Image: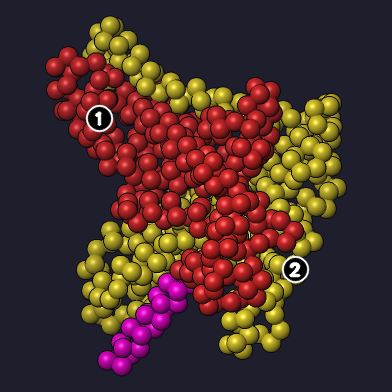
Chain colours: A red, B yellow
Amino acid sequence: MNVSRRATTVLQYAFLGTAAFLSIFPFIWMAISSTNKSIDIISGRTGIGDAFGTNVANFFSQVDVPLVFWNSTKLAVLATLLTIVVSSLAGYGFEMFRSKARDRIYALVLLTLMVPFAALMIPLFMMMARSGLINTHIAIMLPTIASAFIIFYFRQSTKAFQTELRDAAKVDGLKEWQIFLYIYVPVMRSTYAAAFVIVFMTNWNNYLWPLIVLQSNETKTITLVVSSLASAYYPDYGVVMIGTILATLPTLLVFFVMQRQFVQGMLGSVK
Amino acid sequence: MTAGKTGGLKRYYDLNGWLFVAPSLLLIAIFLVYPILRSLYLSFFSGKGMMMKFAGFGNVVRLWNDPVFFQALTNTVTFFIVQVPIMITLALMLAAVLNNDKLKFIGFFRTAIFLPCVASLVAYSVLFKSMFSVDGVVNSALLTVGLISTPIGWLTEPFWAKVLVILAITWRWTGYNMIFYLAALQNIDKSIYEAAKIDGVPAWARFVYITIPMLKPVILFTTIISTIGTIQLFDEVYNLTEGRGGPANATLTLSLYIYNLTFRFMPSFGYAATISYVIVIMVALLSFLQFYAARDRS
């Protein structure tokens, strides 16, 4: 009994250890490879090299780093704020002002979760082309703002919002938008934080739609830059690694600072 | 609920209700409802670029005679049929082990296994491409251990390219699914396990006869979500294969084929829209299955 229990424990640690190692390894690989020359990277060198400076210099000479970073940040932050404002209004509205008609429409909104993006991208592209919005960041943001996932998340969270707070505010003569802005938003700030983390990650990593819409170097995001550097006929992997680090660092940072909100948002948005 | 209210109050209530949801509904109507209907409409037209003419079911006929479409369809289905069960099983096992509070470093393991979810799809695909080159770190490791005697052509042989895609998606999404199971496991009453332990039920039997049945709804949910995600697979194959879905179309997915038809070659909007409806139908069928199974439960 005792021996078999010890064997089980050892097996469990071995299983977890292997899984943890395989999960982390690509990140370590990214860090190590950023110090190696391209030829060393594709021949599997696992030692730390001395090419980090060269790789960084090459990356900065091939890519307008401040511009690309600014594009990514601006897009992700703006799109996230808009999504959260618009979708939380809807989540609150659907829950606080229930009616038969709105409940039916809400069911339809949830149905849109099933719509694959591939079936939208051609008409969306034609629409943006006709409006002269190709190559603009507005075109990237517009289709992402009203998110059924986030509307659902806020509606679910609103169920825990105490209606007494709202009733008291009403007695005090506050208008509906004031109740939302001055009472609901502050009370629900942890819900907002979790939503922010999730939506920010999605926007920062967004790929297919920007790939279609953003065609000039002036508008490209870090994700698009990494992708195009890596798809060159002979990619310089040293340079590519600097790109992947820059693309990954912000989301890693957000994750480590707000891990609790991240998990809460992930679970909550689909509960 | 509104029955007792006077006409004025009811109007006030209704007006506010609509105002709060209006911005979202407007955006959904323009950027979701209209495009999906427009796709359906386009699927009846053929031609290159903006020069389109009505073709009836011509695109369906073309689809039926298009070997590349069938290759993309087969690949897509292969990916989810093989990958989803592997990943769900792995995630379940990890969650079951991580639910044991007596193990040390549990926080570290949990974070480590969850970490891949943070990586952008493009970044990790590019990393995998560099790790799985012919002389790359993975082949070197496998050669050293003696698991293989000649390097595997992960990016050049059709079979291994498929394996690589499956490995990559599994790496990225196992931790994601695991978190759902962990959350569900923490809601299971621990005393059930204690009782089973006292009765001498071994660990594997507790897993099969207690854990899995208790998690059935979550497993079903994550399976559907993962399958729908894999049906739409694009970022990974695009970045592992320079957008070609190679070698020899072995990793071409439906989404990638649609992209190539529309944005790489001279655009055939109508035909691409038709293929996109194949994805719509597949997703709809799976969602229907989910609702059916969910109803069955309650």
Q: Residues within 10 Å of mark 2 (few under 14, many from 20)?
A: some
Q: Which mark is residue B156?
A: 2
Task: Please provide the residue range marked out in magenta.
Answer: A1-23
Instruction: Report in which chain the residue with disc 1 lies.
Output: A
Residue B79 in view of the camera:
yes
Q: Which mark is residue A184?
A: 1
Going by the image, does B74 lie left or right of B30?
Answer: right
Instruction: Report in which chain the residue with disc 2 lies.
Output: B
Quadrant location of the N terminus of chain B in the rendered image = top left
Kindly report the distance in space between the C-alpha atoms of the residues bearing marks 1 and 2: 56 Å
> Residue B293 in magenta?
no
- Taking the spot 50% from the left edge, 54% from the top edge, the residue there is A246
Image quadrant of residue A170?
top left
- Taking the spot 53% from the left edge, 78% from the top edge, the residue there is A47
Q: Nearer the viewer, residue A86 or B59?
A: A86
Secondary structure at numbered mark 2: loop
Percent position of residue B28, x then y: 52, 28
- Pointers 1 and 2 within a single chain: no
- Taking the spot 70% from the left edge, 49% from the top edge, the residue there is B256
Residue B81 in view of the camera:
no
